[in-house]
Amino acid sequence: MEQRNLGRTGLRVSELCLGAMTFSDGDGEAEAHRILDTFVEAGGTFIDTADMYGRGVSEEVLGRWLKGRRRDDLVIATKVWARMGEGANDSALSRKHIVSAVEASLRRLGTDHIDLYQTHMWDRTTPIEETLSTLDTLVRAGKVRYLGASNIAPSQLLRAQYVARAHGWEPYSSLQPLYNLMQREVEWELGPLCAEEGIGIVPFSPLSGGWLTGKYRRGATAPDGSREARRQSTAGDGSWGERDTEETWRVVDALVAVAEEAERTPGQVALRWLMDRQAVAAPIVGARTAEQLTESLGAGGWALTAEQVARLDAASSRPVPYPYDWINGVEGRI
């Protein structure tokens, strides 16, 4: 698996990141460890979790797997923000919560440092100076190596970078946003900002909840056992819901056509498209089985042609609002 720099840092990460969120939802620790083994055997080094996944269970499962392994071969990322208790200070990005949260994550992971510590959301209630100075202290203490953000607006991210720069504090080196062929809003402003600031993008939901795997097709029904089949069963109407739009099916149709041409699966094509976007370091792939992960790993080691990329770009293009439409020109599309 190719290793890339995370943004403008010297930190090298695998071109795919393994998401550990599913390690906390009852699928079994043995299978989680098999998934981790499969990822590492394929050359993967970058693993992402969060303190809120299973209220710490994901970190604990990952921590038990880490025992006996060469820690420096891996890049472990986790996140802080979510409410982890009933107390008034058990959430958000205050100094009190961050310091308590990082110590708890270190205990659960069974390690003395976190390679990438990410703020899970913007905190409107805490001054950004308090958050950033606390994170900088953790870096200087060696408990954290690099900082990242997630679920943040362009203006908030830029403000954080300017504040860190003004005080000589550690800046954000990565951004974890929602980004895939069906949800390209990152390209309006966050993507160019990350490229300019040297921030590596680590997209979550790169397959848009299964919609970019090819299992949902125009005019067909959702496969038994799929996430969409379960949603339809709960809704009781058998419809595709808000996803049932011409824009959705246009992307699916183009993706399936390119996959057949490239002799790859639609999911591999969707991941490959994303891996080659501006400032993207490593999309986060989740898996419930090692076999599912193996399919996603097939996104590495090959390339889409320029013509195939253009077709996928065109199929997933959407009108954008003001002022992006004016900035992008008269067509106003991404």
Image: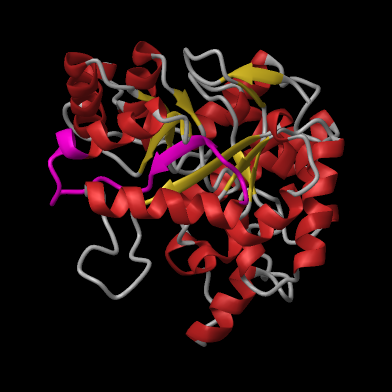
Res 326 quadrant in image: top left
Answer with left or right where residue 128 lies relative to residue 25.
Answer: left
Residue at image x 17%, y 23%? 163
Q: As rendered, which of 238 and 156 lies closer to the eye? A: 156
Answer with left or right where residue 263 lies relative to residue 258.
Answer: right
Q: Position of residue 114 (x, y in %)?
A: 53, 38
Which residue appears farthest toward the bottom when viewing the image? 236
Q: Position of residue 103 (x, y in %)?
A: 44, 51
Residue at image x 19%, y 30%? 155
Residue at image x 52%, y 85%? 234
Res 32 quadrant in image: bottom right
Answer with left or right where residue 105 lies relative to residue 217.
Answer: left
Q: Is residue 194 above or below residue 240?
A: above
Q: Tell me if I can see residue 209 in this picture.
A: no
Magenta range: 110-130
Q: Is residue 252 above or below residue 281?
A: below
Q: As rendered, which of 254 and 224 lies closer to the eye? A: 224
